[in-house]
Amino acid sequence: MRSLPARAVTAICQALQEQIEHGLLAPGGKLPAERVLSEVFATTRITLREALVQLEAQGLVYREERRGWFVAGRRLIYDLGERSHFEVMVRRQGREPATELLSARLVPASAAICARLGLAGLSSVIQVCRLRRIDGRAVLYVERYLNPGYFPGILELELGGSLTQTYARYYGIEYGQVCFEVLPTALPGAAAGALKVSVGSPGLNITRINSDRQGRVIDCDLEYWRHDAICIRAIAR
């Protein structure tokens, strides 16, 4: 008897995966409510939820708090060797990017940020928090920390677009070396809230420590991605 729920979960997964692969359930489309789907598959909502969670782990569907389940689009290829910013990277792959500025302010730097930016203790940094979308779906929450010594007056500028272009236009600063740290993570409160998932949901944390062409560490990005939204790629040379 214990094998029956497992068989039901497998059957539901296979049925939904087939519908997605054949384009009957389009990327970004909302799935029917769990109650409706449980009736379609003549099963309990517990069994249905287990199937959906398995499909979510495979990156085929995703859930948003208080909104329901949706069909996931293809993963974005995140090439660690590219120097292009988010909007360019997304458009090159035939997708539509969007950025929402959540906040920009001067804050006390944590010990970790001081270490990454090479700042003394009790330093202040500029924190810029943004939410980024691909084809309308919120996939990335970013906290960028800037060394204020290199960017005087930047809080008076428009920060919703490309900061890379802002650096070059107003400060004559261009990126040089970038150091990446990539770790699976449980999404913290701010990231989870912005991405409309539960606190502690699985995510991917990419920390970027950015230097300019003169080798000065100028800023640090803490990127929190939905785990099913990207594929990390690096080419060894």
Image: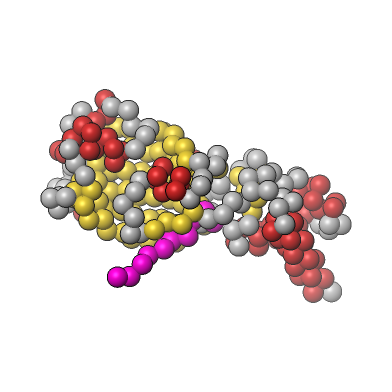
Q: Residue at (55%, 42%) from the top-left corner? A: 135
Residue 145 visible to an observer of this rendering? yes
Position of residue 237 in the picture relative to residue 48 (left or right): left
- Verify whether residue 229 appears in magenta: yes
Q: Label the magenta part by its dominant secondary structure.
A: loop
Which is nearer the eye, 123 or 8? Answer: 8
Residue 113 visible to an observer of this rendering? no
* Residue 61 location (% of width, % of height): 64, 54
In the rendered structure, which segment of residues is drawn in magenta? 228-237
Q: Residue at (71%, 53%) from the top-left corner? A: 23
* Residue 192 location (% of width, % of height): 50, 46
Task: Tell me which corner region of the image, top left, top right, bottom left or bottom right, holds residue 22.
Answer: bottom right
Q: How many marks?
A: 0
Task: Tell me which corner region of the image, top left, top right, bottom left or bottom right, holds residue 46.
Answer: bottom right
Work out whether 199 lies above or below 81.
above
* Residue 137 location (% of width, % of height): 55, 42
Which is nearer the eye, 191 or 213? Answer: 213
* Residue 183 location (% of width, % of height): 40, 62
Work out whether 34 lies above or below 236.
above
Picture colour scheme: secondary structure
Task: Tell me which corner region of the image, top left, top right, bottom left or bottom right, holds residue 33.
Answer: top right
Position of residue 89 in the picture relative to residue 81 (left or right): right
Q: Residue at (44%, 34%) from the top-left corner? A: 100
Q: Residue at (63%, 45%) from the top-left corner? A: 28
Position of residue 79 in the picture relative to residue 171 (left or right): right
Which is nearer the eye, 51 or 93? Answer: 93
Quadrant (top left, top right, bottom left, bottom right) of the C terminus: bottom left
